[in-house]
Amino acid sequence: MIRKIILSAACIFSLAIAKAQTEADTATMYPGLYYRGDTTKPEATEFYKPVPPIVTPGKSFGDAPSDAVILFDGTTLNKWESANDTTKAADWIIDNGELTVNKKGGGSIQTKQKFTDYQLHVEWKEPIDIEGKGQARGNSGVFLASTGPGDAGYEIQVLDCYNNTTYVNGQTAAVYKQGIPLANACKKPGEWQTYDIIWTAPRFDASGNLTDSARVTVFHNGVLVQNNFHLRGVTRYIGIPYYKAHGASSIKLQSHGDPSKPISFRNIWVRPLN
């Protein structure tokens, strides 16, 4: 009899632990959504709110959806400014719907609007007659959050690596000096390439301490090359990454100092996620 009581108590205790673990897992998997009522019935695990907003997708891949902020449509740079002097207009070259880096003093450019978490689409092209090797072959970058002038921020590398080798955490689609891409999906120079990026900005508390690191997922020409990569801080050419508290930030396109011919961009849009 005593043995049966002990076994029954153990079973009840085990079920209580399992129930607590299930509830904890549910809270983790579905923040803000909790099972209610009899969980032996399907209705307890069916949710009807919040209803996702309706978004009309673009007609073809790469076209901006209905809720996107168009950053460059091929006609104007009115959404951009100089990254080194925000009182000045962006000084790059627009021709035939393409935006080309101005290496004759144009400097890097950044968005006037600031963002936190977002989905970003960027198309870019290396010149068909690109020259140079290593990091000096069509070098540029997409900075997901600009934290100051120059190269301050978090960079996804742009480079011609179709037939060009360099350090792997600095090749095309690398989180510069931090994350090696999962694949080399480069197209030939002269062909348009795409980056589709999901950026989750770092979080800081009221005292400026890091509470959650930045994360990024990147598709290069439709190929997954960064899978929810956790950044160790800002990307740096020399030195160790670090975090310094900041809020919403501009998206920046780099004018690199390498001597090769300048690259071009088109069809840039962003969907803020917060």
Image (cartoon, rainbow, N blue to C red):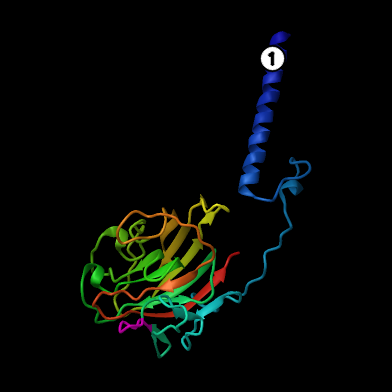
Residue 222 in view here: no
The type of residue carrying mark 1 is: Ile
Image position of 236 (left or right of 136) = right
Quadrant occupied by the C terminus: bottom right
Q: Position of residue 26 (x, y in %)?
A: 65, 44
Which of the 4 image quarters holds residue 164? bottom left
Residue at the limit of the structure toward the bottom, as seen here:
96
| Viewer-side residue, 15 vs 104 | 104
- Is 27 above or below relative to 234? above
Q: Is residue 148 magenta?
A: no
| Viewer-side residue, 93 vs 269 | 93
Residue at the limit of the structure toward the left, as seen here:
132
Q: Main secondary structure of the magenta part?
A: loop
Q: Position of residue 93 (x, y in %)?
A: 38, 87
Residue at the limit of the structure toward the top, as seen here:
1
Q: Callout 1: 10 Å neighbours few (<14), some, many (20+)?
A: few
Q: Position of residue 118 (x, y in %)?
A: 54, 66
User: Residue at horizontal 37%, vertical 55%?
Assistant: 241
Quadrant occupied by the N terminus: top right
Q: Position of residue 58 (x, y in %)?
A: 55, 77
Number of numbered labels in the structure image: 1
Residue 209 in view here: yes
Image position of 169 (left or right of 207) = left
- Is 206 above or below relative to 12? below
Residue at the limit of the structure toward the right, as seen here:
37
Which of the 4 image quarters holds residue 179? bottom left
- The range drawn in magenta is 100-106
- Helix, strand or loop for disc 1: helix
Q: Is residue 101 magenta?
A: yes
Check disc 1 and report the residue beneath it.
6
- Is 153 above or below relative to 80? above
